[in-house]
Image (cartoon, rainbow, N blue to C red):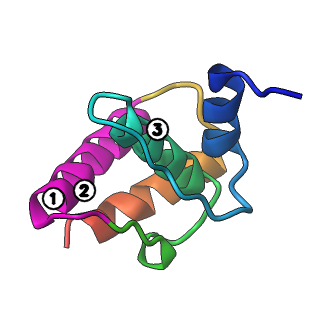
Amino acid sequence: MFMSEDIFRKDIVERLEDNVFVEAGAGAGKTTLIVNRILNQLKAGVLPGTIVVITFTNAAAEELRSRITAKVREACKSSGLSERELANLKNAVLYLDL
């Protein structure tokens, strides 16, 4: 059975209990996919210090950190979060600001 790309992407973002390896060409949406996955992990209560992302360059790592921080801050303003998710994200912001 062939898994469509949309289903594959959704699986990466939502199946938080598994480790993932994301490899694709430039412009394929890797960073967005990883940022969304990490946002979901943080909402679920995964501690930021336990999440590991490996990139090939320091510039890529900084870009990823910047996007994650922006996405978490944006999500904190969302009205669709449970109290627990909001608390988890606010705690993550404190860590990300270090």
Q: Amino acid at mark 1?
A: Glu
The residue most toward the bottom is 49
- Numbered mark located on residue 33 in the image: 3
Q: Is residue 21 above or below residue 12?
A: below
Structural distance between the alpha carbons of marks 3 and 1: 16 Å
Inspect the image, locate mark 3, and give the three-letter code of the amino acid beneath it.
Leu
Asked if the residues shown at circle 3 and circle 1 are in contact, with their CB atoms under 8 angstroms apart, the answer is no
Whether residue 87 is visible, yes or no, is no
Asked if the residues shown at circle 2 and circle 1 are in contact, with their CB atoms under 8 angstroms apart, the answer is yes
Q: Earlier in the sequence, mark 3 or mark 1?
A: 3
Residue 60, horizontal then vertical, whole percent: 18, 55
Residue 54: give x, y in percent of width and height.
Answer: 35, 68
Which disc is residue 65 wearing? 2
- Majority secondary structure in the magenta region: helix
Q: Which mark is residue 81?
A: none
Mark 2, Cα crowd under 10 Å, few <14 / some 14-19 / many 20+, is some
Q: Secondary structure at mark 2?
A: helix
Q: Work out whether residue 91 can be spotted.
A: yes
Q: Which residues are magenta?
A: 55-77
Q: How many marks?
A: 3
Q: Position of residue 10 (x, y in %)?
A: 66, 31
Residue at 40% x, 44% y is 35
Residue 80 percent across, percent down from the top left: 59, 26
Please indicate whether residue 68 sits to the left or right of residue 87 in the image. left
Residue 56 location, quadrant: bottom left
Locate residue 66 relative to residue 93 in the image: left or right. left
Mark 1, residue position: 62
| Quarter residue 41 falls in | bottom right
Residues at marks 3 and 2, CA–CA distance in whole angstroms = 13 Å
Q: Is residue 50 left or right of residue 70?
A: right
Q: Nearer the viewer, mark 3 or mark 2?
A: 3
